[in-house]
């Protein structure tokens, strides 16, 4: 007797004996079966990420996989470019703010001799 035959015989005996149980016992068995199945279901949301199985399973047809990879790479490039641009704008904003609160007049920054003096002072 293999495992499948044994499982079928056990299932048949359990089904036959379940007919003899009263309604309260049948209800408790049903509730216990639902709780056991709920534990076996994969968790959703963050509990899935922290609780056990971790992974993203997306099944795409083979023809769409290169497109999906290309879109993902493009998204990474666009986000990286946005991040770099944002960082540069923030740096320029700090420089502009420093210029505006400084006591030195704007004309001094536009003077070529002042620019040469600043460059010479920064080297020394």
Image: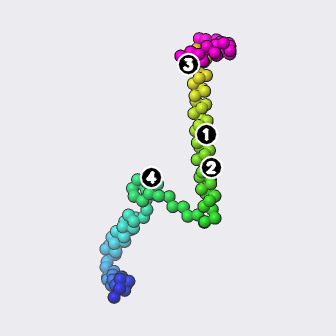
Q: Secondary structure at mark 2?
A: helix
Query: What is the number of callouts on the image?
Result: 4
Magenta stretch: residue 10 in it? no
Q: Which residues are magenta?
A: 103-124
Q: Which residue is mark 3?
A: 123
Q: Which residue is mark 4?
A: 46
Give above or below for 100 relative to 46: above
Q: Which residue is mark 2?
A: 74
Q: Which residue is mark 1?
A: 82
Q: CA distance from mark 1 to mark 3?
A: 33 Å
Give above or below for 81 relative to 23: above
Q: CA distance from mark 2 to mark 4?
A: 27 Å
Residue mark closest to the camera, 2 vs 4: 2
Q: CA distance from mark 4 to mark 1?
A: 28 Å
Residue mark closest to the camera, 4 vs 3: 3
Circles 1, 3 touching at the beta carbon (< 8 Å) = no
Colour convention: rainbow
Residue mark closest to the camera, 4 vs 1: 1
Which residue is drawn at the image coordinates 60% and 26% (left, top)? 93
Circles 1, 2 touching at the beta carbon (< 8 Å) = no
Give above or below for 9 relative to 37: below
- The foreground one among 107 and 122 is 122
Which residue is drawn at the image coordinates 60% and 27% (left, top)? 92
Q: Secondary structure at mark 3?
A: helix
Among numbered discs 1 and 2, the one appearing first in the sequence: 2
């Amino acid at each position: 007797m293999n495992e499948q035959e044994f499982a079928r015989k056990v299932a048949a005996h359990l089904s036959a004996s379940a007919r003899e149980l009263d309604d309260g016992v049948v209800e408790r068995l049903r509730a216990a079966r639902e709780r056991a199945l709920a534990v076996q279901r994969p968790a959703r949301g963050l509990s899935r990420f922290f609780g056990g199985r971790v992974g993203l399973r997306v099944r795409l047809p083979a023809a769409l996989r290169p497109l999906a990879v290309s879109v993902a790479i493009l998204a990474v490039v666009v986000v990286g470019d946005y991040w770099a641009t944002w960082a540069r704008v923030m740096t320029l904003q700090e420089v502009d703010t420093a210029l505006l609160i400084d006591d030195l007049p704007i004309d001094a920054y536009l003077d070529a001799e002042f620019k040469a003096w600043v460059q010479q002072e920064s080297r020394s």
